[in-house]
Amino acid sequence: MRKTWIILAASAMAAASLTAQTRDQAKSFVKQAVEFAKKNPKEKFLEEVSGVKGQFHFNKGQNNDLYIFVYDLEGKVLAHGVRRELVGVVRWTAKDPDGKPWIQDWTKLVKEKGNGWIEYKELNPAQGNKVMKKASFVELFNGMVVGAGIYE
């Protein structure tokens, strides 16, 4: 019995460690995208996010299944690493299945603090667009909300 508890405790600690590591990877990915944006014209940055061959676009099995999304401060999608059809769409009033206006929330967060984490529910492209809990790290850069999230 004691051996079972030790194995369960070790598994829980490993899972917690993976979550922390994944959050670190998402944050690092956003920082990498912001550095790219600082060194390149805005159009090139947005194409690296939305373009299917761009380094910040979703490619299953690469970059830990992370992708970057970019919004302006009014909720307009400037680039999206999975859903190109959203580019140009104003999603300011969008809410998750629980009614949380996550775009308004992350805009407020970056205006007040510059960057941070926000949690909400969203479609997961790596899981067949299943609605899942998501934690996203977002950062304000040059009037843009640049972010990446992990699904939990």
Image (cartoon, rainbow, N blue to C red):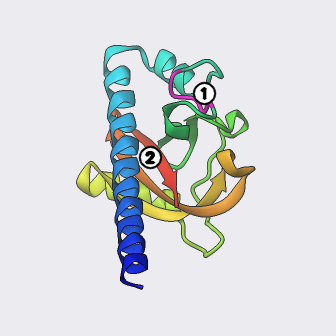
- Give, as a three-letter code, the residue at label 2: Leu
Q: Is residue 141 left or right of residue 119?
A: left
Q: Main secondary structure of the magenta part?
A: loop
Q: Which residue is mark 1?
A: 50
Tell me if residue 75 can be seen. yes
Q: Secondary structure at mark 1?
A: helix
Taking the spot 48% from the left edge, 60% from the top edge, the residue there is: 104
Taking the spot 73% from the left edge, 36% from the top edge, the residue there is: 85
| Alpha carbon separation for disc pair 2 and 1 | 18 Å
Taking the spot 65% from the left edge, 22% from the top edge, the residue there is: 52
Q: Is residue 112 left or right of residue 101?
A: left
x then y, percent, for residue 146: 42, 39
Taking the spot 44% from the left edge, 43% from the top edge, the residue there is: 147
x then y, percent, for residue 51: 62, 21
Tell me the tag on residue 73: 2
Residue numbers of the magenta segment: 55-59
Q: Quadrant of residue 4?
A: bottom left
Q: Secondary structure at mark 2?
A: loop
